[in-house]
Amino acid sequence: MIYYRELKLDRASESRKDRGWLERQWTQPDCRILVLRNDKSLMRWRDREADTPEVIKLARAEIEKLEPGFDHVVFLGLDDSAPLFALDVSQQHGQGLEAVFRSNEFVDLRDVGWLLDAQQAAQLAYARGLLFWNRHHRYCGVCGSPTRSENGGHMRRCTSHSCGRMHFPRTDPAVIMLVEDLSDPDRPRCLLARNSRFPRRVMSTLAGFVDPLESLEETVAREVHEECGIRVGEIEYQASQPWPFPSSIMLGFRARALDRDIVVDGVEIEEAYWFEVEQLREFGEWGDAGDGFCLPRRDSIARYLVESWIAENSVDR
Ligand SMILES: [Zn+2]
């Protein structure tokens, strides 16, 4: 399974350009609002033992004291026919906010994503990515004037009459690749590495951002060579995952190693090894208390790439 995909909302991307339509959605009785603060989402734990938080969707009456202007609200879409918005309260303080808090708390989706219903997790990821973009694009990158939100937060327009530039949410492409060594057909191996930003013990696939004027395959080859000194061929696309942490899409590949000797860059990658299927089966879970190597996070496409590779290489053994 790949998390944060296949969002079932109707994004109503044409209708949302009409301010009147958007305001009518905002006043619908079945309109619901996700609330986020500094990228964290409002949730509630019914049962701490169960470890699964409940996503909170508020009705408009419940956020009235916050008096949100449309500049802090984004339209996500129609859930069946019920309008779903997200409100950013990062700038809010005081009593209105306390009313929203009650027994709720702001939780980082990245800590709980895989515990949630897949649609709810995807909705929260969407809300987080879109609100992040709006919060970080309050000024025009061309002339420096303030921008204002339009199209339900899916566009920001420069308020300077002489400029008026339209800005759209950006998505940064990144490749992520499982490199395999098939030089001994009876003992396939895959390359996993520990990035210096990862928790100790976590081994994952290599990844990197696409440079300007670079094809995805070129990025795969460059990153693997830079980080681990391995040249690769037979680069094949596998799957993709929206990754709004804060604004990427992960493009998953598999590549065939042409070299065996790993030379880590020592900066981004601290250690990297070849692993056989049997070794990967011994890996612990991300965040567990063991002392051996761990698999990547459960909600990452890295995990999907590794698990797919294990499954494929287990079939005829
Ligand atoms: Zn401007």
Image (tube, grey):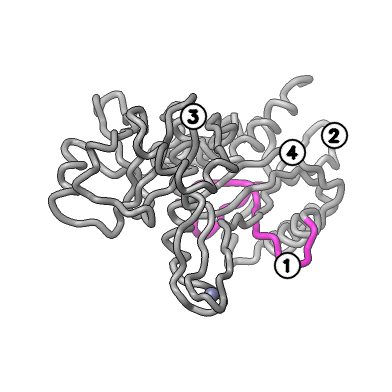
> Which residue is at a point 76% across and 62% down the rendered structure image?
222
Counting residues from the start of the chain, the first of labels 1 and 4 encountered is 1
What's the CA distance linking mark 2 and mark 3? 40 Å
Relative placement, left or right, of 278 versus 83 is right
Q: Quadrant of the N terminus?
A: top right
Looking at the rendered structure, the secondary structure element under dot 1 is: loop
Disc 2 to disc 4: CB gap under 8 Å:
no
Mark 4, residue position: 238
Relative placement, left or right, of 305 versus 185 is left
Residue 165, image quadrant = bottom right
How packed mark 2 is, by other alpha carbons closer than 10 Å (few <14, some 14-19, many 20 or more), is few
Looking at the rendered structure, the secondary structure element under dot 2 is: loop
Mark 2, residue position: 185
Relative placement, left or right, of 266 versus 101 is right
Mark 3, residue position: 119
Q: Amino acid at mark 1?
A: Pro
Q: Amino acid at mark 3?
A: Gln
Residue 227, image quadrant = bottom right
Give the image location of residue 312, x and y in percent: 74, 27
What's the CA distance linking mark 2 and mark 4? 21 Å
How packed mark 1 is, by other alpha carbons closer than 10 Å (few <14, some 14-19, many 20 or more), is few
Mark 1, residue position: 212
Part of the protein shown in magenta: 192-215
Counting residues from the start of the chain, the first of labels 2 and 3 encountered is 3
Disc 2 to disc 3: CB gap under 8 Å:
no
> Which residue is at a point 55% across and 47% down the rendered structure image?
243
State the residue lying farthest toward the front.
20
